[in-house]
Image (spheres, rainbow, N blue to C red):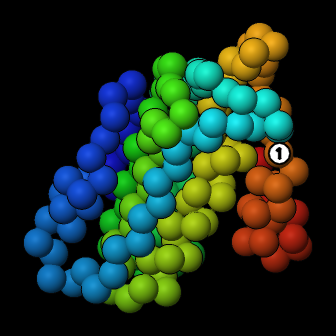
């Protein structure tokens, strides 16, 4: 269960190959790559800076992956999240999950990403023509995470 926070970019193919590592039990790999958009809330973005709380961030991500392992029949998972200054089209986040079957891989990958958005301590600042602004949490992220809870309420 590798988790990495890094300023460097990542190679999706290389990361998936390493995660699979010739494991013959792997029948499915589901992956998600998040990238920097050029527009947010109708404003053109020139750069985005991601900050995190070292140590706490890795612990929060590990807890999310552990919860995914408890809910789904997965073999392994990988989360890579970049920090620092990024530009439109840069890769930000990579989540990959291996499983014997596609359903668990897809569900676990989406679960990890949905909870990463609301539980991991990252802070995002965007620079637009009007200056820098911190990005608030989105209700849509809470709603995505809430779908996984029996009572329909996201737990941060």
Q: Residues within 10 Å of mark 1 (few under 14, many from 20)?
A: few
Q: Answer with left or right where residue 19 lies relative to residue 69.
A: left
Q: Nearer the viewer, residue 43 or 83?
A: 43
Pointer 1 residue: 138
User: In this rendering, does residue 62 appear at all?
Assistant: no
Residue 71: x and y in percent read: 56, 75
Q: Nearer the viewer, residue 101 or 73?
A: 101
Q: Residue at x 11, y 72 (%)?
A: 22
Residue 88 appears at what percent x and percent y?
Answer: 54, 34
Q: Is residue 38 left or right of residue 1?
A: right
Q: Quadrant of residue 144?
A: bottom right
The quadrant of the rendering that contains the N terminus is: bottom left
Which image quadrant is residue 8 in? top left
The furthest residue to the left: 22
Labels in figure, total: 1
Residue that extends furthest to the top in the rendered view of this protein: 131
Q: Is residue 18 left or right of residue 79?
A: left
Horizontal and vertical percent for residue 38? Answer: 63, 36
Q: Is residue 11 visible?
A: yes
Looking at the image, which residue is at 33% across and 49% down?
Answer: 2
Q: Is residue 23 above or below residue 131?
A: below
In the image, residue 68 sits, relative to residue 51, either above or below, namely below
At horizontal 38% and vertical 29% (from top left) the residue drawn is: 6
| Label 1 SS | loop
Residue shown at the point (48%, 82%) measured from the top left? 104
Establish if 17 lies above or below 119.
below
């Amino acid at each position: 269960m590798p988790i990495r926070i890094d300023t460097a970019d990542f190679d999706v193919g290389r990361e998936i190959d390493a995660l699979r590592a010739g494991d013959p039990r792997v029948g499915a790999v589901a992956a998600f790559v998040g990238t920097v958009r050029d527009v947010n809330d109708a404003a053109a973005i020139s750069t985005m800076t991601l900050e995190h709380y070292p140590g706490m961030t890795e612990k929060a991500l590990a807890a999310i992956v552990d919860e995914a392992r408890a809910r789904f029949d997965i073999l392994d998972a990988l989360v890579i999240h970049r920090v620092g200054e990024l530009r439109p089209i840069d890769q930000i986040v990579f989540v990959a999950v291996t499983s014997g079957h596609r359903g668990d891989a897809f569900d676990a990958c989406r679960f990890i990403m949905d909870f990463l958005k609301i539980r991991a301590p990252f802070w995002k600042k965007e620079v637009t023509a009007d200056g820098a602004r911190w990005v608030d949490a989105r209700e849509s992220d809470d709603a995505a995470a809430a779908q996984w809870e029996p009572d329909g309420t996201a737990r941060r």
